[in-house]
Image: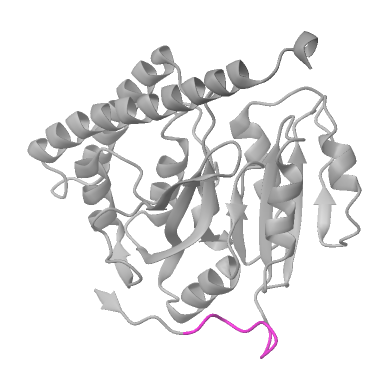
Amino acid sequence: MMVETSSSFDSTSGAAPFVSVIIPVLNGERYIATCLDSVIQQSYSNLEILVANNLSTDHTLDIVNSYGDPRIRVLPDPKHQLRLHDNWTRAMIEANGEFVKIVCHDDLLLDGCISAQVDLLQRYEEAVLTCSRRRIIDDRGKLLIRARGLGHLVRHDDVALLNGRTIAHECTRAGSNLLGEPASVLIRRTALPEVPFDYRWTFALDIEFYMRCIGQKDAVVDGRVLSCFRVSPRQLSASLASRQAEEMKVFFTEMALRYPGDISRTDLQIGKMKSKLLVQARRLLYLHLRFRDAMTARRQPHPDQS
């Protein structure tokens, strides 16, 4: 059902829910400051920022420690470098907030993101999470796509309260994670599953996690653009593209078993076809970025010529 959008929550008007923002990072010196700035400068201030450093060997920790913000808490170093699943999980366990958000170290929150999302989860208590559209930027911060995500779940700038069955059906038919990357999502801590992240999934890790949070309950889908997802020319090779397409096919087949009667064979076939096309489209984007970098390098003067 469609619901009206109201103004963002004003954290100064009363007791503001405590929010935990988790930033997992491995060798993120290039982007960690920009990411932290985007969180620290949010108008919503009642939050903790948990930095889950996964034994970075660059200057990531030096940059994080240079901030004097008392809301930043760096988790103790693990004894050995962790799988992404385990690093995210240890931060989840440490989160104290009523609401939890993961922001990967190279992604960004736009102004008002947390305030807007807290507002929605306060107004729609039946919803276990909320998600928004995001901008796609490249490794230099250049805008590539102005508004991405959610597909047909919601119209531009509208808000919809949807149940898990509808979301599972639409994601399967689209062959895609319509809810977006973690920076686009805010989750009630009470909705977190006992084991947050399933080792079986790599490319479907986030959407599988969201769907276990939602189950048969509701989510608030917000058509506004509230975060930025960064793509890099090194993210997706031909071999990874093939693995991603295969994993998404397996994932949506499992979704059909979790939501019997809501996802048909036709939905699965359409979704599998679209998933392959989407993976190849992403690969073409990454190839374009690599070509751009190669041309930029060729235009740079050789040291002997300067």
Residue 212 vs residue 4, the one in the foreground = 4
Residue 129 position, x and y percent, is 46, 62
Q: Is residue 102 visible?
A: no
For the C terminus, the quadrant is top right
Q: Is residue 255 left or right of residue 199?
A: left
In the image, is 247 to the left or to the right of 289? Answer: left
Is 66 located above or below residue 285 in the figure?
below
| Residue 12 among magenta residues | yes
Residue at the spot 84% in from the left edge and 46% down from the top edge:
64
Please state the horizontal and vertical placement of residue 110, each as a whole percent of the image: 58, 61
Of 139 and 295, the residue lying toward us = 295
Q: Colour scheme of this structure image?
A: one colour
Q: Which residues are magenta?
A: 7-15
Tell whether 178 sits left or right of 233: left
User: In which image quadrant can residue 118 be found?
Assistant: bottom right
Where's the N terminus, which quadrant? bottom left
Residue 234 x %, y %: 54, 22
Q: Position of residue 169 (x, y in %)?
A: 21, 49
**Predominant secondary structure in magenta?**
loop
